[in-house]
Image (spheres, rainbow, N blue to C red):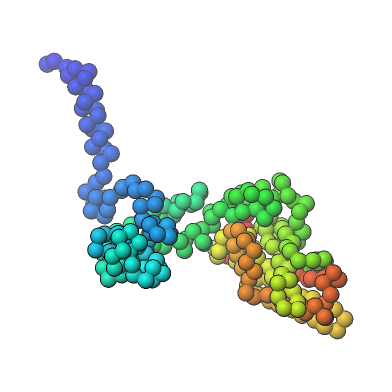
Amino acid sequence: MARPSSTKRKEVAKTQEEKSKRPKDDEVSRGMLVRIEADAFDCPICFEALYPPIYQCPNGHLMCSKCTVKLTGKCPSCSQIIGLIRCLALEKIIETMEISCSNAGCDETLVYIDRASHQKSCSYAQCSCPVCSFQGCVTTLSQHFVDTHKFSAVKFKYESCFGIHVTGEGRRILISPDNRLFLLLINRDVTEGTALSVVGICPAAKEYQFTYELSVDMFSTHLELRAAGAMTCEWKGVHPKTYLFVPDDAFPLPKLQIFVTIKKNNVCPGPG
């Protein structure tokens, strides 16, 4: 019996390889894998991600619900009325579409419409260094800060009260024993006083939640605040709504000493 030629053997091997790569019937029934440009599901007006309800004009131009309200129901592309017809087919796709988290190191697969909320709380979200333009996840940022800016921060221990002398408006960088970064914010942009608060440079994830206490003493006056700490991957100058108010007449700012205590929630250890 003649042996099959080398060409035929290669064709047989290729066919077997292709069959092995094909998804099983039960996998096909669950869905299919496709590649789509990242901006294909963005609103063409505001360039934000499209979420239901999605509206279209009679000519098929799409718009998110926020832009529909802002533009008073008039399509900017053709001036037709928009806001009466919903694009139900695209809404169905977006409601059922799953994507992978874009943060390096995160292997989460999530529903597309949950993308925004996940990005805010993802443990691998990119955080910005408060001193330079470096960006990285909490662990990477911590190592960068220790290697590059460790003398720019005040070291402290969790649950231990420590004092900081304040000489003007701005911020003081605090670094914990596990190299997590916090900002003590001194905001003079309030009426006849100063607002003091603490922010953690980290995603809004459970493992990074913390509480803090601030107190100020001057003669017979004592002010104190206990609050849950705000968390942000990048502080952009927005001060928390919860703060300790220090009146100017009672506490002259150049002589102000602030006592700080930070406690982390024992949900998960911080970056080491």
Q: How many marks?
A: 0
Q: Nearer the viewer, residue 153 or 171?
A: 171
Residue at the spot x=25%, y=60% of the render?
A: 59
Task: Please tell me which residue is depicted at 24% across the width and 46% down the height of the picture.
Answer: 24
What percent of the width, then of the height, locates residue 35? 33, 46
Horizontal placement of 123 versus 110: left or right? Answer: right
Q: Which residue is outermost to the left?
A: 1
* Residue 139 visible in rendering: no
Quarter-of-image position of residue 156 = bottom right
Residue 203, image x and y in percent?
A: 56, 60
Pick the quarter of the image with the N terminus. top left
For residue 210, side relative to residue 8 (left or right): right
Taking depth in this image into account, of 123 and 37 the one nearest to the observer is 37
> Where is 4 relative to 192, above or below?
above
Which residue, as the protein is rendered here, is positioned at the far top? 2
Image quadrant assignment for residue 45: bottom left
Residue at x 78% of width, y 71% of height: 259
Residue 108 vertical placement versus 160 (above, below): above
User: Eyeballing the image, is 195 above or below 23?
Assistant: below
